[in-house]
Image (cartoon, grey):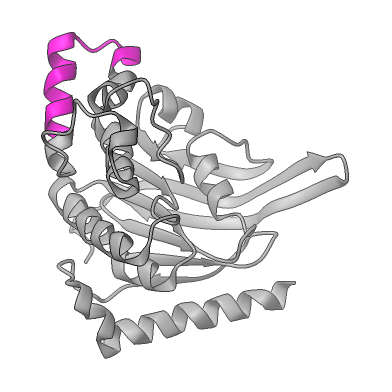
Amino acid sequence: MKGVSQATVIEAKNLDLTFQTNDGAVQALSGVTLDIAAGDFVSFIGPSGCGKTTFLRCIAALEQPTGGTLTVNGMTPEEARKARAYGYVFQAAGLYPWRTIAGNIRLPLEIMGFSRAEQAERVKNVLELVDLAGFGGKFPWQLSGGMQQRASIARALSFDADILLMDEPFGALDEIVRDHLNEELLKLWARTGKTIGFVTHSIPEAVYLSTRIVVMSPRPGRITDVIESPLPKDRPLDIRDTPEFLEIAHRVREGLRAGHAYD
C-alpha cells in the first residue's frame, strides 16, 4: 500500500514527555520512535492515559516534549504550525453555535487572511468533499452529531494542509453513524492523499482505516508494536469479516496485552 516515493513527513526519535504536577512528575511518553510517511493513514491505539493524544498534541505543537526529537515536514512542530502544515480535528466538533457551518469552516481562512472570494471557494469545495453541500447556511444545532463532526473535518481541510491529525473524532457517536463516517473518511483520504494520524480506542476502527497501526502501552506510553496492514486501499465494511482483518485485529489485541508487561 506504500507509494513508490513516499517521503517521511513526521519523525520522532526517543521522544519523552514528563508533566510536572502538584503530586509530582508524571511521565506520559517514554522513548517513542516512529516515522510516518506521506500518504500514510496511521492509527494510534492503546488504553486510556497511554499517551496517544499526547503524542498527537506534540506533533501539533500543543505539548512540548521533554526529551528526544520530533520533526514535521523537516521542521520543528512550532515551525510546522506556523507553516500551516496540518489540520487538527478534536474529539468534540467544537463549532461556534452563533456561526453557520460555512462561517465555522471559514474562520481559520479569515484568520489566515484569505480573500473573501478564496474563502467562499474553499468553503464550497470542502463542504462538497465531506458531503455537506447545501448545509453551509445551517447552524451547528441544526445538524446531527455526525454531520457536525464532518463539518469539523471540513474546517481542518479548508486550508489544504497535507497532514490531518484526528483525536478520536468519532468516539462519541453511535456504531451505525461511526461505521458510515469511517467509510466516508476512507473515501476522503483516497480523494485527497492526505497523511492522517488518527487516535482511537476501537480495534475494528483502527484495523479498518489504517495502513499502519501503532499499538501503545499503558503510561508511560511506549510503542509495543507497529503493524503494517496488508488490506487493500479500497475497503468495504464487510472486509471486517474476513480472515485477514481478524488476523490483524488479533495482533493488535495481543500488542495491547503485551503492553501491560510494562506496568
120, above or below 130, in the image: above
Left or right of 150, for residue 253: right
Single out the residue that lies furthest toward the right: 23
Left or right of 26, for residue 131: left
Q: Tell me the magenta residue range.
A: 110-126
Where is residue 178 drawn, in percent x and y? Answer: 32, 61
3, above or below 103, in the image: below
Where is residue 225 drawn, in percent x and y? Answer: 50, 72
Left or right of 230, for residue 14: right
Q: Main secondary structure of the magenta part?
A: helix
Where is residue 75 drawn, in percent x and y? Answer: 44, 32
Q: Residue at x 49, y 33 (%)?
A: 77
118, above or below 88, in the image: above
Q: Is residue 73 visible?
A: no
Q: Is residue 194 visible?
A: yes
Q: Which residue occupies the foreground of this view, 4 or 72?
A: 72
Q: Is residue 139 magenta?
A: no
Single out the residue that lies furthest toward the bottom: 243
The answer to which image quadrant residue 47 occupies is bottom right
Q: Is residue 125 magenta?
A: yes
Q: Residue at x 31, y 25 (%)?
A: 104
Left or right of 52, for residue 205: left
Q: Which residue occupies the foreground of this view, 110 or 255?
A: 110
Q: Quadrant of the N terminus?
A: bottom left
129, above or below 110, in the image: below
The answer to which image quadrant residue 152 occupies is top left
Q: Residue at x 53, y 83 (%)?
A: 254
Q: Which residue occupies the foreground of this view, 190 or 202?
A: 202
Q: Residue at x 16, y 55 (%)?
A: 187
Q: Quadrant of the C terminus?
A: bottom right
